[in-house]
Image (cartoon, grey):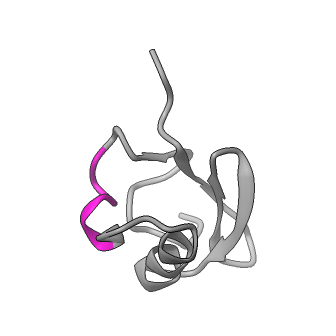
């Protein structure tokens, strides 16, 4: 089984979640807008529509679309 090419990692204490695309660090997202911007820069067409597709994005260590530590 292949893993998703985009991983949104667990939230950090200071806020935000690290994002990797094909195992390369894309940045620290503080909201879905940041995440979509990273994906667009990486050439993902229609980025906002793949956020809930597990074939594209794996949300680790927290709820999807939540960027603060709970």
Q: Nearer the viewer, residue 66 or 25?
A: 25
Give the residue displayed 48% in from the left and 75% down from the top: 40
- Residue 60: image x %, image y %? 54, 45
Above or below residue 1? Residue 14 is below
**What's the magenta region?**
48-53
Above or below residue 42? Residue 58 is above
Give the residue displayed 59% in from the left and 66% down from the top: 69
Q: Is residue 18 left or right of residue 51?
A: right
- The answer to which quarter of the image holds residue 21 is bottom right
Q: Nearer the viewer, residue 11 or 28?
A: 28
Dominant secondary structure, magenta: loop
Q: Nearer the viewer, residue 43 or 60?
A: 43
- Residue 14: image x %, image y %? 75, 78
- The N terminus is located in which quarter? top left
Number of numbered discs: 0
- Residue 18: image x %, image y %? 68, 63
Q: Nearer the viewer, residue 30 or 14?
A: 30
- The answer to which quarter of the image holds residue 63 is bottom left
Give the residue displayed 30% in from the left and 72% down from the top: 48
* Residue 8: in magenta span: no
């Amino acid at each position: 089984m292949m893993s998703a090419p985009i991983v949104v990692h667990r939230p950090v204490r200071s806020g935000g979640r690290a994002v990797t695309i094909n195992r390369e660090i894309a940045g620290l997202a503080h909201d879905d807008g940041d995440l979509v911007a990273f994906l667009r820069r990486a050439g993902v067409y229609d980025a906002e529509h793949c956020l809930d597709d597990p074939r594209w994005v794996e949300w680790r260590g927290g709820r999807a679309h939540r960027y603060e530590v709970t």
